[in-house]
Image: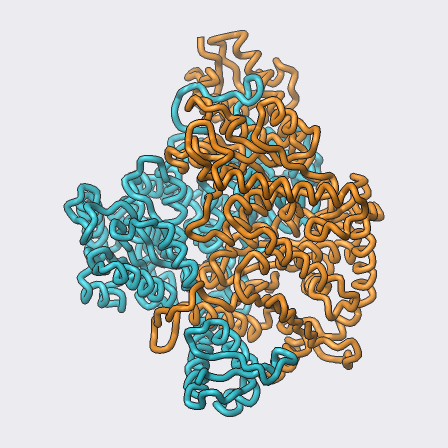
Chain colours: A orange, B cyan
């Protein structure tokens, strides 16, 4: 590892943008403010931030504290106080660091279980009911149970993979129909993997029931085409036992959903697709080692957290725009959206003070995004910092590649657009970070995931929030449950009075609801889906809130 | 059309969030602040914004002015002063409104040309060189030449479509390889449609050359599998003539890239996929008619523009998060990212004053996003307003649908999650808009596109910027061209001295560049791609900026 940053360097540099630096000044700044992990083929460059090196230096005590807390967490401290959980995703790639023999054994056991299962699926010894062998994987999961697998499987897909992985990540029946249709006639050769840590996530439960129904409609036994990834004893675990699923993989309370990609959640689909998961784990482990470095300026995760802090003054005042110049990494920003925003977007800090912390993430890929919203990044409000991800290797294979102009390849253009955009942003006083990797492979992807996992943890400590819970989302789920309860009341009332028409307000009053708007919204939705047997009656045709609905006679 | 808003209504309501309204208050507010286009199956609800009705009323003069300017623009006024262009995407769905016979005839001619072409492709009378008929479309385009087609083709895809549409929307060689590989052996049955308004976009040119090379490698003539959509006389037009492309479709200077989805750009791939483009156009036309309504409070586009203005105080202070609860609409936010951010993200206003205007857009789909970043929306910084898109119809077909709990379908859950999230956000003082459509079909999609096109135009007038140019992006392209010129210089220098090693700084000096960092970045990229014949030499192994490179001997 070679670090341009030197703890002893003079700390009195001016902010980048105040100095209108020449290209040579920028190069000197690059040397001082970038970090290369040559062994891993990874580099991080902070030189195009506005912050001065003195600003960075001033953060060192906070970074030291964050690194110390991270060390305690890695040793098994309770890092999620309200859920009283340990946070151990780091152990997944280094079981020897787990704080107990039980945990260590559980990780190793799951790893062995996965190897055996994958081999049996690939060699056809574990075969479906009717088809000769499994050729497709259908993962049913949402949030942390889908975003990691989607990123990994898409980034590392190669033609010739033994299996292709498809996803049901919502409770949209039309979306599920589409995914099932996209399998063509291949459902009998499809292994469905249902992923839910708690085993109680409604979207996933619904997706599983829809998919199970589709197998049934083809005369196939769902359990003989299914595996589950869930906590022991969960509802899903019970279903998997009852229906004799082919396999049940564990989840543990010390792995959070959004950091579960290197547990069975990410590894099962990856291994089935043919990805070398040992490389993914090893990249994660190497980055973990590099990011345990106690000197913040030599630690890429600490530098990344510091960059976020400096860009958004520790309050997320600027959006983090993530643009990898590589199609394979297009889902990175969506993955980071969850990892970063769900971890940092918190009302209260650890002292119970209302702080409304967060850090917004968006982005797709370059140079495509240059033809979409980069116009605004260049000319619009200075409300973001860009993270450019550069991949040095253009395409696989060593054969001569097509020249699109004399001596220039499409990959050279891609590289030129990245550096051109970076320069144009700097010229306009807009901040950017640059991450460079040699190529997109399992090892580098594992390293990038591990880098962001740790950076999020460190940043959370710097701004004093709990990165490992998500208290807000329960309120939406509760409100949704109330809407569904209301729907049941409405259906019962109308069906008991077939042909009798009700507008929303009188109906709300009749069933004792104080929420006529929700009654109206439920009625509209019911009437749009004929199988419920509720229709909008013609009695009143004025404003929609006067519309009346009745159960069919 | 029934508008809850009444121009004569008393204007003195308090801000929503200041009043802690009951569900009944919210329903009354909903009645006053929502607009239903019953004929179109469309509704827009502003009731969960923080703004008061007085705030909205105060915007009326500005909205009136914007509507008047829009009327002038629709009559053919020069709306893009620095490019001296008319802005006529509205005429695409109502040629009778075009300001000249030439334009009217051009639109009608292109429409007829498309009909004939689509029929010939579908019935196999226009067949590829070797395969029996075309079964796939490969669209090569970027930005406005890809985002619209991607949205439309994905939103309206059905199993049983006559053709499937694939995309090359970047100059990433690995990404192009992946797309070509995903065609399986079907390249001989693939029609490539190259889309570039100017005909000079490098990414598209590169994509075309790569794809053409792939046909060539299979002994196929590219022109016999290609069509072009471009301006008459462009570089691409010349290539298409030379290589005897199957067809050339026109683009016109009065259609901007980001509003071109209802020109040949969007219609050709849509028609080939089997979409009823007359419905798409008709939905656009109906929404155009509804949004020409001169009373702002009865005009959905004016209301939408007003909502954006009120949420972000006319300066884009809040991000627009767009979350359709429907998998088919997942690309809507990416489409709107371009339409909104490229149109509004401007440094100078129309008077030449530096204003740094813009409006940030991101989002994916619900309820999936509830398991990703909605935690931050609920608990984090109040730096956004959410646009929820509700689709009343759950799935196609009238047959009974699966119940996932007694009396409840997956679609009911989807609806419950939408309304639950909306309520949870309101409870926390977070703003949201709600758009409701009956179903996702060509007509509603055309209407939504037209709605946003007009809302962007109106908002641009309100904040006094030119919505129809993109002056910033040229700087990135220029800087990219400089990097590629530098690469040519570096290659020439090193190849003239095979085996001689240079580090970045001495090399920069030798070739007369004042930018050693760019030299270093070009060297790293060249060395990572062996076909260039440049290697990192072992002489110096210290910090990366001291690394040296040489041409192979």
Residue B225: x %, y % from top left: 23, 55
Relative to residue B368, is residue B113 depicted above or below? below
Quadrant position of the N terminus of chain A in the picture:
bottom right
Residue that appears at 51% across and 34% down: A126
Quadrant position of the C terminus of chain A in the picture:
top left
Q: How many marks on residues?
A: 0
Left or right: A54, with A500 as reference point: right
Residue B98: x %, y % from top left: 26, 52
Does residue A523 appear anywhere in the picture?
yes
Which residue is more in the foreground, A168 or B199? A168
Residue A152: x %, y % from top left: 55, 50
Left or right: B152, with B535 as reference point: left
Question: Which residue in the rendered view is the most extreme toward the right?
Answer: A351
Question: Which residue in the rendered view is the most extreme toward the left?
Answer: B125
Residue B489: x %, y % from top left: 43, 85
Does residue B8 appear anywhere in the picture?
no
Relative to residue B241, is residue B313 depicted above or below? above
Which residue is more in the foreground, B367 or A263? A263
Which residue is more in the foreground, B372 or B313? B372
Q: Which image quadrant is residue B276 in?
A: top left
Left or right: B325, with A47 as reference point: left
């Amino acid at each position: 590892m070679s670090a341009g940053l030197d703890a002893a360097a003079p700390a009195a540099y001016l902010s980048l943008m105040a100095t209108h630096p020449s290209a040579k000044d920028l190069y000197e700044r690059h040397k001082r403010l970038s970090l290369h992990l040559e062994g891993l083929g990874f580099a991080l460059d902070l030189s195009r931030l506005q912050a001065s090196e003195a600003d960075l230096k001033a953060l060192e005590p906070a970074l030291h504290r964050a690194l110390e807390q991270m060390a305690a967490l890695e040793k098994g401290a309770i890092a999620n106080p309200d859920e009283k959980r340990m946070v151990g995703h780091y152990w997944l790639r280094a079981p020897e660091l787990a704080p107990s023999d039980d945990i260590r054994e559980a990780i190793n056991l799951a790893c062995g279980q996965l190897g055996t299962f994958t081999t049996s699926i690939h060699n056809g010894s574990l075969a479906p009911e009717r088809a000769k062998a499994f050729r497709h994987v259908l993962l049913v999961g949402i949030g942390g149970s889908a975003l990691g697998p989607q990123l990994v499987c898409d980034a590392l897909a190669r033609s010739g993979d033994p299996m292709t992985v498809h996803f049901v990540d919502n409770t949209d029946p039309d979306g599920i129909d589409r995914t099932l249709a996209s399998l063509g006639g291949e459902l009998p050769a499809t292994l469905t993997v249902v992923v839910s840590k708690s085993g109680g996530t409604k979207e996933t439960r619904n997706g599983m029931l829809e998919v199970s129904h589709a197998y049934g409609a083809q005369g196939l036994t769902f359990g003989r085409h299914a595996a589950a990834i869930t906590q022991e004893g969960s509802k899903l675990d019970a279903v998997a036992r009852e229906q004799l699923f082919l396999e049940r993989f564990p989840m543990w309370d010390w792995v959070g959903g959004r950091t579960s990609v290197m547990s069975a959640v990410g590894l099962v689909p990856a291994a089935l697709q043919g990805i070398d998961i040992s490389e993914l784990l090893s990249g994660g482990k190497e980055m973990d080692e590099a990011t345990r470095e106690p000197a913040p300026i030599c630690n890429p995760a600490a530098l990344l957290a510091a960059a976020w802090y400096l860009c958004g003054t520790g309050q997320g005042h600027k959006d983090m725009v993530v643009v990898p110049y590589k199609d394979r990494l297009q889902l990175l920003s969506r993955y980071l959206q969850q990892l970063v925003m769900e971890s940092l977007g918190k009302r209260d800090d650890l002292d119970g003070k209302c702080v409304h912390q967060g850090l917004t993430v968006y982005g797709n890929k370059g140079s495509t995004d240059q033809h979409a919203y980069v116009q605004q990044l260049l000319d619009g409000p200075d409300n973001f910092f860009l993270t450019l991800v550069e991949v040095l290797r253009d395409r696989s294979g060593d054969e001569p590649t097509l020249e699109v102009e004399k001596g220039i390849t499409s990959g050279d253009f891609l590289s030129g657009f990245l550096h051109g955009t970076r320069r144009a942003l700097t010229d306009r006083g807009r901040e950017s970070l640059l991450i460079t990797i040699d190529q997109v492979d399992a090892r580098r992807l594992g390293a990038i995931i591990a880098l962001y996992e740790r950076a999020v943890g460190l940043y959370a400590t710097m701004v004093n929030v709990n990165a490992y819970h998500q208290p807000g989302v329960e309120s939406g789920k509760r409100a949704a449950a109330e809407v569904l309860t209301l729907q049941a009341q409405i259906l019962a009332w109308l069906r008991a009075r077939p042909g009798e028409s009700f507008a929303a307000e009188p109906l709300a009053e009749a069933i004792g609801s104080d929420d006529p708007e929700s009654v109206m919204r439920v009625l509209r939705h019911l009437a749009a889906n004929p199988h419920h047997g509720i229709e909008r009656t013609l009695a009143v045709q004025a404003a929609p809130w006067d519309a009346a609905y009745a159960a069919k006679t």
